[in-house]
Amino acid sequence: MTTPAHVLGCTPDTPNSLLIRNARRIVPIENLIIIGGGPAGYTAALYAARANLRPLCIEGYGAGGQLLISGTVENFPGFPDSVMGPDLVASCRLQAERFGTRYLMTDVTEVDFSSRPFVVRTGREEHLAKAVIIATGASARTLGLPSEEALAGRGVAYCSVCEGPMFQGRRLLVIGGGDAALEEAVGLTNYASEVVIVHRRQEFRASPIMVQYAQANEKISFLQPYVVEEILAGDDNTVVGAKLRNLEIEATHVEPAGGVFVAIGHDPANNLFRGVLELDELGYIRTEPGASRTSVEGVFAAGDVQDHTYRQVVTSAGSGCVAALDAQRWLASHAMPEAAAAAALAHS
Ligand SMILES: Cc1cc2nc3c(=O)[nH]c(=O)nc-3n(C[C@H](O)[C@H](O)[C@H](O)COP(=O)(O)OP(=O)(O)OC[C@H]3O[C@@H](n4cnc5c(N)ncnc54)[C@H](O)[C@@H]3O)c2cc1C
């Protein structure tokens, strides 16, 4: 890391009051950097911008987040006729911009939270901030099949709470053998005519109670040990079934289905934060219950990157609000007084 060498005064054309000159260029100290441009990041940006913090949101090359690949969102309040996921997240972005959020559409490549101001790097660029909100999201694991990618949103789904109601009366396959898969399967029986759990092993990773619960459900049946070789589309390019292979006898057959739910886990976007912040046993950023504080004071987290339970747009947006309010309060009471920061940096 380049050690900041000189603290300069405030200039009228910079939003924040401290400027640091490092080896390459003069860098303003932002009040707040938000990493991630999904529902959590944009909601945090909206609240922070309305509190006059002029946040910088580094939204990543995947700006828009998971909603970019979603279809209709039926469960975000305020849209009685539903809303398309990409439209919803684009509106969130615009709303935060209206109040002064600045955006950088690039990926953060490294962070240094070992001292303040915090350092957030985007390739060769270095950004400094008094506080940081992390909202880098998560992604559903995929089977890695070309047919799966081609049919995502056309019968291939990853979230029963989000998309289950759109599969009323259909026969569905749920792929996976953990608690999440069995929970998805049970949840889907509220809509589906029948649910078939396809699992590659004879044993389940899911807890015995969850297995019993699924086994007791008369709408659920099991295919083990099977893997999916291909997801099949009909003339209208939507899912009509899947080609499955039995791992014991190496035989394949086609299983008809009106939808395939892939439930083999999620990966939080935590690469930047391993060894930097405390993560939980599943790799999600650990935050204080009911709040957004992480293990580093002044660093907050929101959305799916810290939530392996709910993973919804509304919960992500809600936690973005919480993070912005937490950051705002923290900045008001803890942020480095500027004179002290100047003195500290001048002596570094
Ligand atoms: C197909 C699909 C359909 C869904 N349907 C629904 C639905 O109907 N209803 C519902 O409530 N939920 C739905 N969800 C879930 C919902 O989309 C997520 O819960 C929500 O988007 C999470 O928001 P987030 O802001 O935490 O993260 P994300 O939306 O994942 O956004 C993460 C952001 O972080 C950025 N980022 C990641 N790494 C970096 C980095 N290194 N530097 C800078 N930026 C970075 C990405 O570019 C992205 O902008 C669906 C999800 C999927 C995949």
Image: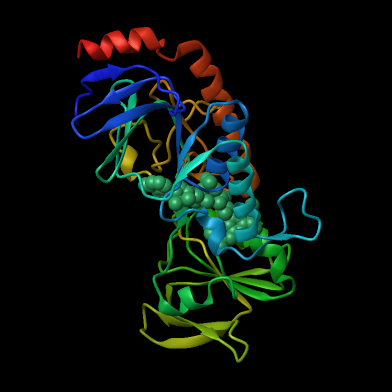
Percent across and percent down for residue 171 are 66, 76
Determine whether 13 is above or below 140 in the image.
above
Instruction: State left or right for residue 299 relative to residue 92.
Output: left
Of the pair 196 and 274, the residue shown nearer to us:
274
State the colouring used for the structure image. rainbow
Quadrant into which the N terminus falls: top left
Q: Is residue 233 left or right of residue 31?
A: right
**Residue 55: x percent and y percent?**
50, 33
Name of the residue lying farthest toward the right: 80
User: What residue do we see at 40% from left, 13% from top?
Assistant: 336
User: Which residue lies most toward the bottom here?
Assistant: 235
Does residue 213 appear in this view? no
Q: Is residue 31 visible?
A: yes
- Where is 231 relative to 50, above or below? below
In this figure, what is the number of numbered marks?
Answer: 0
Q: Nearer the viewer, residue 332 or 172?
A: 332
Q: Is residue 231 above or below residue 168?
A: below
The image quarter containing residue 251 is bottom left
Which residue is rendered at x = 57% and y = 36% of the image?
Answer: 100
The residue at the point 52 percent across, 85 percent down is: 232
Residue 87: % across, % down: 64, 59
Whether residue 128 sits left or right of residue 302 in the image: it is left
Residue 250 screen position, x and y as percent? 36, 84
**Depth check: 50 or 296 in front?**
50
Location of the C terminus by quadrant is top left
Q: Which residue corresponds to the image point at 36% horizontal and 78% vertical from the top-left?
A: 248
Nearer to us in this view, 286 or 217: 286
Outermost residue, front side: 12
